[in-house]
Amino acid sequence: MTRINWFPGHMHKARKEIAEVMDEIDLVIEVLDARLPHSSENPLINQLRRNKPVLKLLNKQDLADPGKTDDWLDYFNDQPDIQAIAMDQTQLKLIKQIPDICKSFAASRVRSGRPVRAMIMGIPNVGKSTLINSLLGRRIAKVGNEPAVTRHQKRYSVHNGLALSDTPGILWPKIEDQDSGYRLAASGAIKDTAIEQDLVAGYAGQFLIDEYPLILMQRYKLDRLPDNADELFDALGRKRGCLRPGGHVDHFKAADILLNELRSGKIGRITFETVVEWEQKRIAAEQAAAEEAAASSAQEKDE
């Protein structure tokens, strides 16, 4: 697999700006993609928030696998100073409750009559700007179905006691886990120019074959489950008329259909990752680090 690095200059600037104003913030609102809750969780936020409480909003839950979303909510809510809620932009009643939830994290400021200061953070294209517009009840933040629409930090005020700061969607300098990189790209968090589309579509296609075969077959009316992504694009392309002269399937067009329908939810409600998977990866990483430290220590003794 190709390792994905994507850290534009404005994101480096945003990281510095966030660090500078964090002392003035009472809590962080982190917007995650419910389809990839861990991969869309920016490790830089834990470094920058300085033990501030966090409200994690698993946005786009209407596109995600409901059972797996429940597992992720349990996982996050078991952690100290974190509250997690699943939502989507149609749940206006729930969105209106967010200011009160934020105020519960800073009771002393509420008692003193001062606004609770919240910074909204998240990776690109996760729905931050749409959420801000919903909270404010008017179109203030620029919205776009592509990464990196917000480029500069902005401050807004909510009249019901919440002072809200918006930040650019920031990715971390290097995406260490290859699965995370491809999942972010498949979801649309990373611009299509950052990695070849056929690689991303191939990853997504194989994932659907392995994890959501029935949904895949129903969506594209397949008679049998393809063995691999190439077979999937061939079958999908023939179903959708993606043909070149001579009857050859245009796999690029077929891949584009798959990615667009995956991102829009037309394929069905899917989640790219599970809590169990990431716990296994964490344990394996800790074991590898321990073995590396032991080997290094042994080498020092031999020298």
Image (cartoon, rainbow, N blue to C red):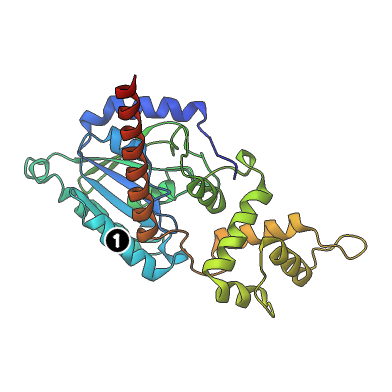
Q: Is residue 132 above or below residue 74?
A: above
Using the image as rendered, state which of residue 302 and residue 187 is in the foreground: 302
Q: Which residue is mark 1?
A: 73
Q: Is residue 154 left or right of residue 262?
A: left
Q: Position of residue 218 (x, y in %)?
A: 61, 78
> Is residue 266 something one can see in this rendering?
no
Using the image as rendered, state which of residue 226 and residue 14 is in the foreground: 226
Q: Is residue 221 above or below residue 178?
A: below
**Can you tell which quarter of the image residue 234 is in?**
bottom right
Q: Is residue 198 left or right of residue 24?
A: right
Q: Is residue 240 above or below residue 59?
A: below
Q: Is residue 29 left or right of residue 149?
A: left
Q: How busy is the neighbourhood of tag 1: few (under 14 within 10 Å), some, or many (20 plus)?
A: many
Identify which amino acid the numbered label 1 is placed on. Answer: Leu
Q: Is residue 46 above or below residue 100?
A: above
Using the image as rendered, state which of residue 181 and residue 157 is in the foreground: 181
Q: Is residue 35 left or right of residue 280?
A: right
Quadrant in which the C terminus appears: top left
Which residue occupies 45% across, 37% down?
Answer: 171
Q: Position of residue 189 (x, y in %)?
A: 51, 46
**Marker count (numbered):** 1
Which residue occupies 30% across, 51% down?
Answer: 56
| In the image, farthest residue toward the right | 246
Q: Position of residue 251 (x, y in %)?
A: 76, 58
**Can you tell which quarter of the image residue 88 is in?**
bottom left
> Is residue 205 something one can see in this rendering?
yes
Which residue occupies 48% across, 28% down?
Answer: 10
Which residue occupies 47% across, 59% down?
Answer: 272
| In the image, farthest residue toward the top | 303
Quadrant in which the N terminus appears: top right
